[in-house]
Image (cartoon, rainbow, N blue to C red):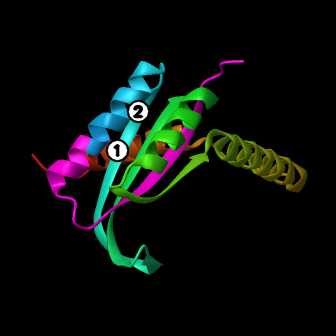
Amino acid sequence: MNTARQYELVYLVHPDVTEQGVTDLHSQIEAVVSRLDGRIEKTDHWGRRKLAYEIARQKEATYVLEVFNGSGELVRELDRRLRVMDQVIRHGIFRVDEDLGKTERARAKRTATQRRRRTARGLPPEPDAREAAARAREEGEEGDQNGVVS
């Protein structure tokens, strides 16, 4: 079973590593991801921050977030490689697609409940966000045209 899922990889880089070293580390991760048919969606370089507690006698680290799509095999390979890299103090790989699905289902359920309640009260159905934005733009354009004095 080789299904692609979305994951977040957060890793902490030793504070002695330069910006070029962090870039090299990112390129190594990118090579592993592309070799195993994954795709990096987003890279967020959070910079150097103070740690909540000491890790390996370090009080600061450089934080990097990578969002990628890939298989379980890719996650295992990344985990294996990050464990042996001396530059990486700590790392974590988290699956986020399941959480996004739960959030979307909860939002749809909440919207359906709101619509049902509005109908039960005898109120008109609430317009979609796109319809409301289009209506607001139209009203704004009409106001500009009516307020123009020639």
Magenta stretch: give its range.
1-24
Where does residue 85 sit, x and y in percent of width and height? Answer: 38, 49
The local secondary structure at tag 1 comes to strand
Label 1 crowd bin: few (<14), some (14–19), many (20+), radius 10 Å: some
| Residue 2 shown in magenta | yes
Q: Report if residue 20 is visible in the image.
A: yes
Residue under pointer 2: 40
As measured in the structure, the alpha-carbon distance from the residue carrying label 2 to the one carrying label 1 is 8 Å
Q: Is residue 17 left or right of residue 108?
A: left
Find residue 125 and report its image quarter: top right
Q: Which residue is pictured at 40% across the width and 29% down the height?
A: 32
Q: Amino acid at mark 2?
A: Ile
Where does residue 80 sit, x and y in percent of width and height? Answer: 52, 41
Q: Quadrant of the N terminus?
A: top right
Q: Which residue is pictured at 32% across the width and 35% down the height?
A: 28
Q: Amino acid at mark 1?
A: Thr
Note whether 79 is above or below 40 in the view shown: below
| Residue 4 shown in magenta | yes
Decide which of 98, 64 is in the foreground and name it.
Answer: 64
Where does residue 70 sit, x and y in percent of width and height? Answer: 54, 28
Decide which of 116, 68 is in the foreground and name it.
Answer: 68
Where does residue 149 sit, x and y in percent of width and height? Answer: 13, 50
Marks 2 & 1, CB-CB < 8 Å contact:
yes
The local secondary structure at tag 2 comes to strand
Note whether 2 is above or below 11 in the view shown: above
Label 2 crowd bin: few (<14), some (14–19), many (20+), radius 10 Å: some
Q: Report the disc number at residue 117.
A: none
As drawn, which residue projects farthest toward the right?
Answer: 120
Residue under pointer 1: 43
